[in-house]
């Protein structure tokens, strides 16, 4: 065949390959070249036309099988952190836990009398812990909406933890503190912004709380300074 004819034939074949590739995804394009090949992507997310073999990931005891399929492996110094409440996991730095789809610091271990006057922080708000003391509780369903329902649900279950109470209070700027009745697994909320009437009772916010019990399983968490 004449050299010019061969060049024209090759050019036509190359053009056909390009046209064919334009109708395929990068994954399909590379798979046609080899079942173990993956597309090489640029920093901007575009496919550069090259394929490469994906590095094999070997999990050495640090492996999590996702409920919806797939396996998660942790490398580079991170460790597997599993959220038992949702049966989900992620690779987190050492010392962190996985909760609500984020790697966060573990909840402080609260016990009495060891934690009395301890400062704990949530959502950037500092709370002081007071053992066997409680602040006057008040929750307005008209103002608290979903937060009120959350508190009532915790109370019905009787399984509220110190962290549950802290999370509810810290999430709403109206909350000045909360009581955790750990003998019953109950939460109670204080809201000083309701005013000082006897019915609202929100004006009874004090630090330290002036209601003390010697025989009640209650721990108060009080915002410091007042929010």
Image (cartoon, rainbow, N blue to C red):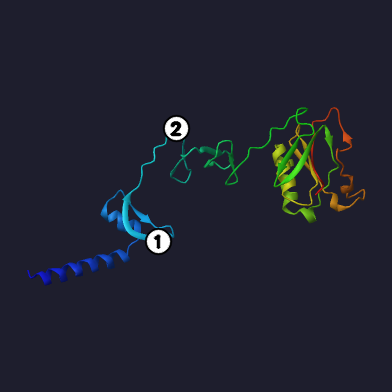
**Image quadrant in which you'd find residue 9:** bottom left
User: Residue 72's x, y, as percent?
Assistant: 46, 42
Please report the residue visible at 42 percent of the width from the left and 33 percent of the height from the top. Answer: 60
- Left or right of 80? Residue 49 is left
Above or below for 154 versus 217 = below
- Left or right of 51? Residue 132 is right
Asked if residue 109 shows in the view, the reply is: yes
The answer for how far apart the CA atoms under marks 1 and 2 are is 35 Å
User: Residue 126's x, y, as percent?
Assistant: 75, 43
Q: Callout 2 environment at 10 Å: few (<14), some (14 to 19), or many (20+)?
A: few
Residue lying farthest left? 1
User: Residue 208's x, y, as percent?
Assistant: 86, 38
Residue to which mark 1 is pinned? 46
**Mark 1 vs 2, N-terminal side:** 1
**Image quadrant in which you'd find residue 155:** top right
Above or below for 190 versus 218 = below
The residue tagged with tag 1: helix, strand or loop?
loop
Above or below for 125 versus 50 = above
Instruction: Say whether marks 1 and 2 touch (CB < 8 Å).
Output: no
User: Residue 77's x, y, as percent?
Assistant: 49, 37
Q: Callout 1 environment at 10 Å: few (<14), some (14 to 19), or many (20+)?
A: few
The N terminus: image quadrant: bottom left
**Image quadrant in which you'd find residue 86:** top right
Please report the residue visible at 54 percent of the width from the left and 38 percent of the height from the top. Answer: 81
Q: Which mark is residue 183?
A: none
Residue to which mark 2 is pinned? 61
- Left or right of 138? Residue 19 is left
All told, the count of numbered labels is: 2
Frontmost residue, 144 versus 76 = 76
Frontmost residue, 32 versus 188 = 32
């Amino acid at each position: 065949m004449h050299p010019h004819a061969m060049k024209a034939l090759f050019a036509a074949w190359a053009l056909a390959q390009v046209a064919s590739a334009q109708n395929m995804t990068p994954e399909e394009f590379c798979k046609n070249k080899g079942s173990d090949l993956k597309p090489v992507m640029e920093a901007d997310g575009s496919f550069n036309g090259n394929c490469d073999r994906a590095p094999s990931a070997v999990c050495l005891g640090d492996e999590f099988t996702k409920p919806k399929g797939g396996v998660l492996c942790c490398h580079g110094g991170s460790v597997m952190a599993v959220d038992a409440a949702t049966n989900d996991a992620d690779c987190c730095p050492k010392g962190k836990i996985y909760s609500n789809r984020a790697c966060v610091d573990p909840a402080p271990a609260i016990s009495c009398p060891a934690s009395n006057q301890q400062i704990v922080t949530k959502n950037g708000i500092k709370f002081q812990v007071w053992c066997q003391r409680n602040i006057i509780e008040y929750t307005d369903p008209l103002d608290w909406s979903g937060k009120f329902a959350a508190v009532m649900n915790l109370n019905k279950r009787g399984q509220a933890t110190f962290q549950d109470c802290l999370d509810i209070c810290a999430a709403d700027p109206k909350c000045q503190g909360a009581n955790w009745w750990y003998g019953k697994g109950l939460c109670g909320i204080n809201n000083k912004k309701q005013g000082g009437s006897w019915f609202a009772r929100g004006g009874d916010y004090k630090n330290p709380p002036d209601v003390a019990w010697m025989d009640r399983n209650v721990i108060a968490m009080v915002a410091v300074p007042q929010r």
